[in-house]
Amino acid sequence: MKILVIDDNQTNIDSALSLLSDHDVTTISSFNEFEKMHHEKKDFLKEYDAVLTDLFMPFEDSMRSMVPEYTAGELVPFGTSVVFLALQEGVRYIGMCTDGGHHAHPLLWAMDMSGYSKDKEVFKIGNSTFCICNASDSRGRYPKHNDGKNWLYVLNRLQECL
């Protein structure tokens, strides 16, 4: 399977490369890098069977002309844009994983309120299967890998729900 992983944390990238070694994995370490790839080739996501992304990634100085009120390093839920683009391109498996608790950001609180963390984390949307996982799950449902995100768990959850 051809998989794209987007995460700004090197531990999470290493986890993806280790756990998904049986697959053809491409990694991107920032939303800015993702945006450049999308700008160069609008439909590049169609090349992938799965797109696995972090939810929050840092705002970068190079983005300041677009949104001057943000500061470099500020965490922004860029993963949602990745998910929307992957859905538009019809990527079969789309996983988004965060490691922030619901006290860390209003978006995470709202997602908790919607019930995604109560074994309702997988959704069928058109021809795509979408999964959202929280790596900081205190109930122990989510197995970590060497302190990084367990991207294999996310992929398996997606494949279980065909």
Image (cartoon, grey):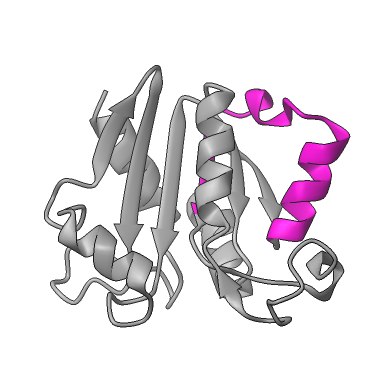
Q: Which residues are magenta?
A: 31-53
Task: From the viewer's perspective, tell me whether residue 156 is left or right of residue 10.
Answer: left
Q: Is residue 48 above or below residue 146?
A: above
Q: Is residue 161 above or below residue 98?
A: above
Quick one: quadrant of the C terminus?
top left
Quarter-of-image position of residue 101: bottom left
Task: Measuring from the top left, give residue 120's x and y in whole percent.
Answer: 16, 46
The answer to which of 111 and 127 lies nearer the viewer is: 111
Identity of the residue drawn at 41% across and 58% down: 97
Instruction: Name the image quarter holding residue 1.
Output: top right
Q: Nearer the viewer, residue 28 or 89?
A: 89
Is 37 one of the magenta-colored residues?
yes
Q: Residue at x 77, y 29 (%)?
A: 42
Return the x and y of residue 34 as percentages of the image width and height.
73, 50
From where the camera sits, is residue 21 visible? no
Question: What main secondary structure does the magenta stretch of the protein show?
Answer: helix
| 138, 11: nearer the viewer | 138
